[in-house]
Image: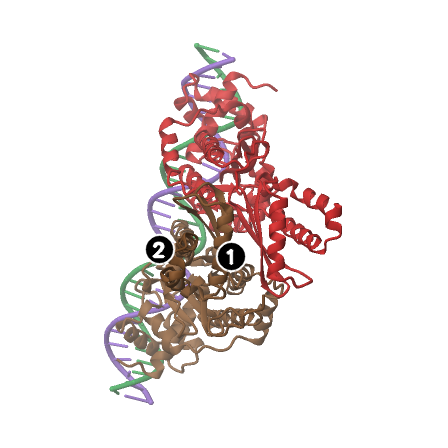
Chain colours: A brown, B red, C purple, D green
Amino acid sequence: MELRERDQKVLEAVISGYIRSGEPVGSRTVSKHYGLNVSSATIRNIMADLEDMGLLQQPHTSAGRIPTDKGLRLYLDSILKIRELEKQQQVLIRKAFESNKNDLEELLRRTSQVLSQFCKQAGVVLWPRLTATRFKHIEFVRLRPRQILVVLISKSGLVQHTILDWEEDITQDDLDKYARYLNELLEDAPLAEVKDRILREMESEKVLFDQLFSQALALSERAFQEALDSAEVHIEGQMQLLRNPEFADVERMRRILEAFEDKTRIIRLLDKALDPQRQVQIVLGTESDVNELQELSLVSSPYKRGETVLGVLGVIGPMRMDYSRIIPIVTFTAALLSQLLADPKEDMAGQGHPEPR
Amino acid sequence: MELRERDQKVLEAVISGYIRSGEPVGSRTVSKHYGLNVSSATIRNIMADLEDMGLLQQPHTSAGRIPTDKGLRLYLDSILKIRELEKQQQVLIRKAFESNKNDLEELLRRTSQVLSQFCKQAGVVLWPRLTATRFKHIEFVRLRPRQILVVLISKSGLVQHTILDWEEDITQDDLDKYARYLNELLEDAPLAEVKDRILREMESEKVLFDQLFSQALALSERAFQEALDSAEVHIEGQMQLLRNPEFADVERMRRILEAFEDKTRIIRLLDKALDPQRQVQIVLGTESDVNELQELSLVSSPYKRGETVLGVLGVIGPMRMDYSRIIPIVTFTAALLSQLLADPKEDMAGQGHPEPR
DNA sequence: GCTAGCACTCAATTTAAGAGAGTGCTAAAG
DNA sequence: CTTTAGCACTCTCTTAAATTGAGTGCTAGC
């Protein structure tokens, strides 16, 4: 079931017409405005064929056609040609990043704002996986008896804290000792390897006979467990979605926005999109397993430092998005963010120039 | 212009009818369902009087009446009697707090969830003002040359961090010394006084001649400046608002929800409601200066540790909320939170039992 | 001062009629 | 065999008119 050149053209015309207007596209419109020199009747025949193939569908008899998911998928995979982002837009986006606070979290929040603003949809940024960064510092603070606050800082400046309930009370002095020991032991270690390193250390003789060290390691193990599992995502401009006419129905919109409140779903979705191989990935809602997001679609791109993928960023909008406009924005933003991250901080695996202390 | 008993009754009937249904309430309904033994014609006369007084209004001729802001205000201030929350509900709310993680931030997030869930509106919690808590720990980490990450921990377990750009490079060893010095100097100090204490210390002779100390103080001053100014608010269940039929208009709803995205507005609103004198405060949107929230209303209550007001929590919903149900929930939740906070951590001014180290 | 009754108003709902967009099919032309 | 013109048909959307119903204000009588 191969598509001939002309059939592709028609599919493309229907899809881009639908993306522009949100309305079903009829044969007349296609024959007139998309430069195929055939009559509307011919288009109708082709459209009927495409419908048989499951690429188009009719909301009702005597309406125009809209793409099915399958049709959209085909369009995205093999018809749409992705251009580079216009220079002009590039400049604007660069400018939006200018008030560079050097604070990573700030930078990521800004990124999601930029995405949302330029794409007029919801912008999402999945926080860097801690496992992709390097250890910088750990600190224990005794909040009250048997309760310890652990602050973990990655070399990139991400700060994570957890409160641990510990069976046994530890004085602040001891905690300080633990921290000094661990800070030395783990200096500059990739966080992904930290747990291994702790386990290896736990087995070494030196530790086996030192109550202090072994407790420090046990403590840090628990701390890292909590820290490395956690994932965080920042979503900006969800309300832009309300601008899309297809979400005029409040009840439906409410369900969708409620799904956004539980971020674990979004994280799951983004996690799936974290494929370092591909520069851009598009997940149609129907392809995901998140029921509430069926009618939406995600355009995402991983961002990296050097060769290491840190996280993903992207845009969530209605299936009917102007992909030809949004894809370049997303990939450009991802590249720009990667560039901003690469520059002055060396945090990535395999390229550490440990700084002098 | 005094209201007679009966007039009050009618006002109350109209308001509670309107709150229940969201529709204008007619004279027949009032005379039938609200146990005043007078005919609808009499009610009509009274309603006309109340309208003259500016307490009621008609959306159009031949519609029933709805309260004006003034009428609502009068109702809230002098007619509505606030009952205690039903025992049954109390138990449910207590239960919702049970998985007590001891983590303050977690607790506050949970609180806003509870508020949103039980009130079926948006729940908000203004984070404790750092100035109301005590100093626990400060830590400096040199991220890269001339860039320092400051982590500030309050005794209650709140963690704040900022990145400072410093003119001059400081080694991690020196930073550690600074931290030790400051941790000793500021031990258990109320954060509100910390800046004073730093300034005083800066003038003392001991420091004047010690380059190290003076830089430590300068650094910490900048850090505290950033930390103490920041305010944070957690909002949960905004989407519940979409459930209210008066927000069926997507465009209007979008504007409101967009206002939520910029939290500074909400913070300003809550800040105004932070009156330690009153157990519960109600701000009608029209009384606030936030344009986007004109159609909403806030029911809030301060929460404390001991006698110190830490922050505010509350519920944001349409003006037409079931205040008689929501006010008890809000005050109860505030009291419960205060109780949960009071118990095992001693962090409040004037009652410190500093823990042994 | 209260109430029954009635004329009147206005929004919301229902109904009917068109208009418009688009299709599928057929038959003729290329 | 493919393309095209033509036409009947379908279905939605818009508009206007008619109807319904809730509610009011006013008046006159109790």
Under circle 2, the secondary element is: helix
Image position, residue A175 (x, y; %): 49, 50
Image position, residue A170 (x, y; %): 45, 45
Give the residue type that dot 2 points to: Glu
What residue is pinned by disc 2? A292
Q: Nearer the viewer, residue B55 or B178?
A: B178
- Establish if A171 lies above or below A314: above
What label does residue A180 carry, if any?
1
Q: Is residue A131 left or right of residue B205?
A: left
Q: Is residue B309 visible?
A: yes
Host chain of mark 2: A
Same subunit under labels 2 and 1? yes
**Quarter of the rendering containing residue A61:** bottom left
Image quarter of the N terminus of chain B? top right
Dot 2 crowding, Cα within 10 Å, few <14, some 14–19, many 20+:
some
Q: Nearer the viewer, residue B104 or B346?
A: B346
Q: Is residue A240 visible?
A: no
Q: Is residue A22 left or right of residue B299?
A: left
* Nearer mark to the viewer, of 2 and 1: 1
Whether tag 2 and tag 1 are in contact, CB under 8 A, the answer is no
Image position, residue A129 (x, y; %): 44, 63
Residue at image point 41% right, 72% down: A276
Instruction: Name the N-terminal-most of marks 2 and 1.
Output: 1
Host chain of mark 1: A
Q: Nearer the viewer, residue B2 or D6?
A: B2
Image position, residue B317 (x, y; %): 48, 39
**Quarter of the rendering containing residue B219:** bottom right
Give the residue type that dot 1 points to: Arg
**Quarter of the rendering containing residue B92:** top left
Residue at image point 63% right, 52% down: B223
Q: Nearer the viewer, residue A143 or B53?
A: A143
- Establish if B174 lies above or below A337: above
